[in-house]
Image: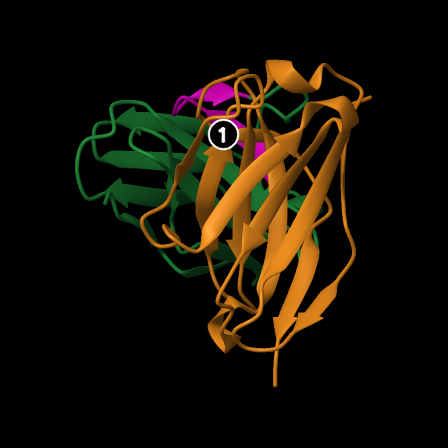
Amino acid sequence: DIQMTQSPSTLSASVGDRVTITCRASQSISSWLAWYQQKPGKAPKLLIYKASRLETGVPSRFSGSGSGTEFTLTISSLQPDDFATYYCQQYNSYSAFGQGTKVEIK
Amino acid sequence: QVQLVQSGAEVKKPGASVKVSCKASGYTFTNYAIHWVRQAPGQRLEWMGWLNTGIGNTEYSQEFQGRVTITRDTSASTAYMELSSLRSEDTAVYYCARDRHGIVATMGDYWGQGTLVIVSS
């Protein structure tokens, strides 16, 4: 099974900050990676698919990059609505999620 | 508009089974796969399996192989996830999600509201 590891687990940041979250796969997944945002009590929301493709309607301050085993999600200027937990998901072989990164207010 | 509406919360005893439904509307049900994902309290999302809604084929995570069954009723545009031999660790919110790319196993773009399943004696 492919394991997904995110870092950091928690990130403290302020509005306007540039934020980067890393996701590593235990083996190569090419670009078969998605990123989600989840708020408490809500279903996940798709942000990015195929590592770098922005889902329709998602603000352009979100971007994704990487291939193989290392990927990043960047929020260029953190907004109040962005405080949430972010998950990566591989879909190269079956599927698996990272453990999540909570972005909290500094 | 695309909507996935799941059945209500369940309380089950250890050893029992639970069956959660996911009713789709706003698109052609058989043109998009359905995934099932769960989330235990404070834990990460866990992918359980996916359903080819067109022909009914399924693939399951090794973690749940032998305990999970995903089915569908195309006439009702509804997918079902049944989990058997429940234990306390199965207490979680269970989600269905439509695959963004059709009848393939990629990622979910539209999600149900979640169904809380509590396993307790």
Q: Colour of chain B?
A: orange
Question: Seen from this angle, which residue lies furthest bottom?
Answer: B121
Quarter of the image for the N terminus of chain A: give it: top left
| Chain letter of the residue beneath label 1 in the structure image | B
Residue A71, image x, y percentages: 31, 34
Residue type, label 1: Met
How many marks overall? 1
Q: Which chain's colour is green? A: A
Identity of the residue drawn at 17% across and 37% down: A27
Measured along the vertical axis of the image, is residue A36 above or below residue A41? above
Q: Which residues are magenta?
A: A44-54
Q: Can you see residue B43?
A: yes
- Out of A43 and A72, give the one closest to the viewer: A43
Q: Is residue B101 magenta?
A: no
- Residue A101 % position (x, y): 45, 54
Residue B95 in the image, given as x and y percentages of width and height: 62, 47
Q: Residue at position x 46%, y 24% from top?
A: A49
Q: Quadrant of the C terminus of chain A?
A: bottom right
Q: Is residue B50 left or right of residue A16?
A: left
- Depth check, front residue: A40 or A91: A91
**Residue projecting furthest to the left:** A27
The rendered magenta stretch, by its main secondary structure, is classed as strand
Asked whether, in this view, residue A106 is left or right of residue A97, the answer is right
Judge from the rendering whether residue B111 lies leftward or rightward of residue B85; answer left or right: right
Q: Which residue is mark 1?
A: B107
Answer few, some or many: residues within 10 Å of disc 1's Cα (few below 14, many 20 plus, some between 14 and 19).
many
A48 part of magenta stretch: yes
Callout 1: helix, strand or loop? loop
In the image, what residue occupies the spot 38% across and 49% down?
Answer: A98
On the image, the x and y values in percent for residue B89 come to 48, 72
Position of A68 relative to B103 (above/below): below
